[in-house]
Image (cartoon, rainbow, N blue to C red):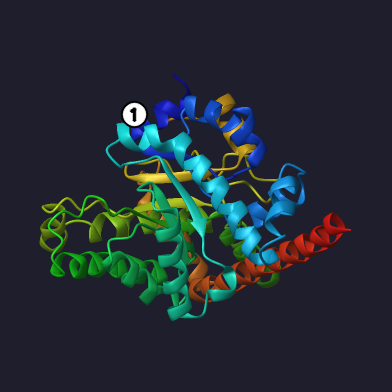
Amino acid sequence: MTKLDDLHDQQGQSPWLDNLRRDWLQNGRLAELVSKGIRGVTSNPTIFAKAISGQDTYDEEFKSLIATMSVEDAYWDLVIDDINNALAILRPVYESSNGGDGYVSVEVAPSLAHDTDKTIDAARGLHERINQPNVLVKIPATAEGIPAIHKMISEGRSINVTLIFSISRYEQVIEAYISGLEAYAASGASDLSAVASVASFFVSRVDTEVDRRIEAAAGQDGDLRGLRGRAAVAQARQAFRLFTQRFSGERWDALAAKGAHVQRPLWASTSTKNPAYPDLAYVDTLIGPDTVNTLPDATITAFLDHGTVSRTIDTDLTGADQVMSALADAGIDMEDVGRTLESEGVASFSKSFDELMQSLADKANALIA
């Protein structure tokens, strides 16, 4: 038993790996991490950009694929191959947890983030092409993504909602999930237990942006500077409180009676960006039941070494409210922070995807030559 096992068994939080590499699928590293307590895997365009561009393990298959298809179609073949292999490794976790964990996430193309209809088509296509019960298709929580999330849930498809940066957007995500389940039940589905969803709340990036604004506004204000590094955890704790409120009461109970699972909050972007902050600043502080924390490999190593397994997510909600009130009083608009980070997040993933496509095009030309 490891601290990762304790995190789940004692506190009800599921640790997932925030990385996916083909060599780890081949050399047993992913299976080893699962044996140590990792219960799921997430991926995104940046992760695949690093994996595919930085390794030669894809070259042979890629060369074969580009003989009959475009570079982008070849990319999706490579990605889906990795996803399927990861799904097989995590399938025993899915089975033993009765669908509670064992998920692998794959994201729709980031260029679709502001196109509802194309996001729906892409998410449906990935679900049908992969056709495994433990796959989660990632849809960004943009204004255009919200109705796509509702539509996919209403069709009984499991979704990882990504790029959430604000409480107001999180409220919309929860409503899309709950109303989507209600629509699915109204369509004739009597058992909702096969539908799963997580809501990925990005954490460390919030502190990065808020700290930048604090520095710009603080001047000689030492009290304001004292709020640096505190916004992300405070907001995540408020999000957990909202989660507990919305997934209770008559409306939710009616769905739960049909087997519905709560949409768990998932803490994403949990590696520490500011070296002045503790390496587990976004792990030890956000432990609680019915949650997921996605951990990069270095953060997993750190947690296994010196992490603390203790419930912290709701131990100081008053303090969280005070932090957010102090930021508001200082003119730090968290809704604007959320909008900024959402825009930057979509742009960052789009940039990674475009750079990867160019890299693959260059590689295709070299392999053909």
- Compared across the picture, whether 276 is left or right of 233 comes to right
Disc 1 element: helix
Reply above or below: 169 against 322: below
Front in this rendered view, residue 120 or 333:
120
Q: Amino acid at mark 1?
A: Gln
* Quadrant of res 247: bottom left
Q: Nearer the viewer, residue 301 or 22?
A: 22
Q: Compared with residue 103, is residue 130 higher up or lower down, i.e. above or below? A: below
Picture quadrant where residue 172 is located = bottom left
From where the camera sits, is residue 39 visible?
Answer: no
Farthest top residue?
A: 1
Residue at x-position 54% and y-position 75%: 112
73 lies left or right of 35: right
Identify residue for label 1.
10
Q: Position of residue 154 (x, y in %)?
A: 26, 68
Horizontal relation, residue 195 to residue 191: left or right:
right
Q: Is residue 16 left or right of residue 159?
A: right
Furthest residue in direction right, as rendered? 369
Image: 368 above or below 33: below
Q: Quadrant of the N terminus?
A: top left
In this view, the residue farthest toward the front is 68
Question: Label 1: few (<14), some or many (≥20) within 10 Å?
Answer: some
Report x, y in % for residue 106: 51, 55
Q: Is residue 244 above or below residue 112?
A: above
* Residue 16 pos. (x, y %): 48, 41
